[in-house]
Image (cartoon, helix red, strand yellow):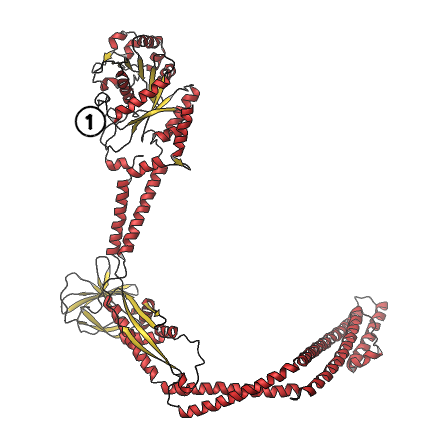
Amino acid sequence: MGNQESMDNDAKSTSLEGVDFDKLGSILFRSIPVMALLIILTLSISTIAIRYTKQLFKSTSTLQLDIKSEAKVLGFKSFDDDINNLAREIEIIKSKLFLNKVVDALKYDVSYFQYGDILYEERYGSSPFEIHVIECAPGMYNRPIDLEIVDKAQYKLSYEFSGSTFERTFHFMDTISSEGLKFYIELSPEYAKEVGNRYFFTLNTHTNTLDYINKNLTVEPLDFKANTITISFKDHTRQKAMDIVHAIDTLYLYYTQLEKNKANNQKINFLNEQLNQTEEKLTELENYFENFTIDNKTTDLGANLSRTIVLLEQLDSQRFSIRKKIEAYNDAYDDIIAEKELSLNPADVSVFSNEMKQDFARLNILSQEKEILLISYNKNTLAYQKKEQEVNTLKERLIQYIKTSRNKLSDNLEELKSRRRKLEAEFVELPSKRTEYSKTERYYGLYEEFYLTLMKNKAEFELAEAGTVTDFKILSSASSPSTPISPNRVIYYGIGLVAGLLLSFIFVGVRYVLNNKINSQQELERLSSAFVLGSVPFYAKGKNMATRLVVNNNLKSEISEAFRSIRTNLEFLNNRGEKPVIAITSTISGEGKTFVAANLGGIISLLNSKVVLVDLDMRKPRFHEIFEDTNTNKGLSTILIRKHKIEECIHTTNLENLDYIPAGPIPPNPSELILGGPFEELMAHLKSKYDVIIIDTPPVGLVTDGVHALKIASIPIYVIRADFSKKVFLNHVNRMIKVHKLNNLSLVLNSVRGSSADTYGHGYYDDKPPTKVSKLKRLFQS
């Protein structure tokens, strides 16, 4: 029991969180050829992508902005200190105003292309023909027009327009008018007949060319301290990219030269701007003095203090009067809403106008008349409803008037409060106002002196430089790119390599997840509670595939050592001192139980122990093939029907202590023969003559013949074949332990894969000779 727990712990140590690293390593090792193929495939795809991706070139130039600030000539610094000259010039270059001039200078009205097998190539500067457009309808712009040169005199033109195809042959230099397009084509003098080449051209609009340049143009600062910028342009044609950058550099120098010609106006405008700003400041200060005098009524702050106190008292009196009026309006409003008789207090009479007083009196009279009518009439009568409507109309008018008047009084009250707060603030600020007034007087004197200085300088420096003027130098002209920036071979091959590795790992992961077969002894120990006797390595097939007794050929071979290890473990299991009866079975055919039985018997017989092999698999016997015995007329089946004696059916082998009993003729009822008395007699006889009995039983997953032999055996052995037997086969093992009480059932892992190319084993009931499995096919077997 302790050994079992130790093996369980060892098995668990090879697995981390459910991952069997031994199995994963085995699958990874066997997947190396496929992984190599995947990496080669992805790298090949990268090579194809590089081959059929249009090359992209980048031309670059460097400009230096020499900033000359000459505002000090006028005796003062520029007020516009926050201007970022570098960013401003970059935006000028990228502006549509400047790029429009570039488009006009390039005259890039027609683009010429040549068809290839997969891609097409622009024939910039090397077109075998030239288009001269006279007129062009808007619908013909940005549309490919195919052209095929027939010979030096003729060409074929074809294009689609409005759903129809236009195709016709013309002569060079002939003027063509078709579908709103008028042009003629001139053949280049350097044209050399290129067999099989096809061309097409497009007519570019000004807007399309502008968008194209703006999309591929990059202007970036290079060094802020050195005031340098880089201008770069990307295109599939290196010469075209260089020409566009050169055009931008040249035009920008010309553009700055035009700006320099405006220096005189800039000087005058600059001085006028400064004069206007100073004049506005002086006007602002003068307005301050005026407002100060108007607001304070005097420049004498002592007299202004007394006046402020008087004004505060007046405001308090006005606020009290307004509050009384609001209260009078509120009382009248409440009486109207409550339909009480309106009675004005003597103190409130002056609040209301004569018209309102009359309306109050009239409302009282109408209300009384309504009450009188109610005595004689019903509320639904016309006279009462008319009187009530008259009363309601008058009430609404009075209520509206009261609300309006009350709102006005409230606004007046708020205004008085605001004025009082303002006076209180002024009263508090009177000491600081004097200081502010004195300071403003000093500023006014300075600005007045500054204004006079500007006037003098304007007359004196009318032709002098002013403001900021930029001067530019081309530090590096447009470069001719020698290598494309795209496709980047390193990046493409890197992506291909990473994709190959990723696909390889996915392939290994899928094989690992889909692998439902037992691969190693550690996995077998982890999945089953039965004791594992050991494992048998690969058996490489020789020319004679029927010969499977291999332990006698090379006693020092790996497979012989494996069977010796199993033989040693069997000695520990047979601790009762009885002659062991070993029954060997498997789940299905092809797992190598016969191979294990024969070689286990052979290795035990080398210890001078007499061993007999019994072929109990009477449906598909194999022992006669192993020992190259052609006599199958007698054997176990004839012993059980008492046709032959036991001694007659025992066959010897080339090993001195190893005998075997073949299955004999195939009977129709093997199960009934095994359960009969003759089988028990056979076992008793063999125990008296041999030290070890090894029984090769039929697969218990297919038939139940071998279950009886397993029960009577002192050591039942269950053979599992690595990389062949499925994990679900262990359900048979566990079921036999529980149902048939075979607690001493042991396992042997057969045909553990190593590095051999060919492996042992083929279909148990397959009469056809085993066919050679290709290495590639075996890589996908898991």
Q: Provide residue 567's location: percent of width, then percent of height.
A: 31, 20
Horizontal side of 776 relative to 509 (left or right) equals: left
Q: Residue 551, can we see it?
A: yes
Taking 748 as reference, is 384 above or below it? below
Amino acid type at image mark 1? Gly
Q: Quadrant of residue 711?
A: top left
Residue, disc 1: 542
Q: Residue 283, can we see it?
A: no
Where, quadrant-wise, is the C terminus in this rendering?
Answer: top left
Q: Nearer the viewer, residue 521 or 575?
A: 575
Q: Nearer the viewer, residue 313 or 560?
A: 560
Where, quadrant-wise, is the N terminus in this rendering?
Answer: top left
Horizontal side of 626 relative to 299 (left or right) equals: left
Q: Nearer the viewer, residue 326 or 461?
A: 461
Q: Quadrant of residue 544?
A: top left
Q: Provide residue 668's location: percent of width, then percent of height.
A: 31, 15
SS at circle 1: loop
Q: Provide residue 706's location: percent of width, then percent of height.
A: 35, 18
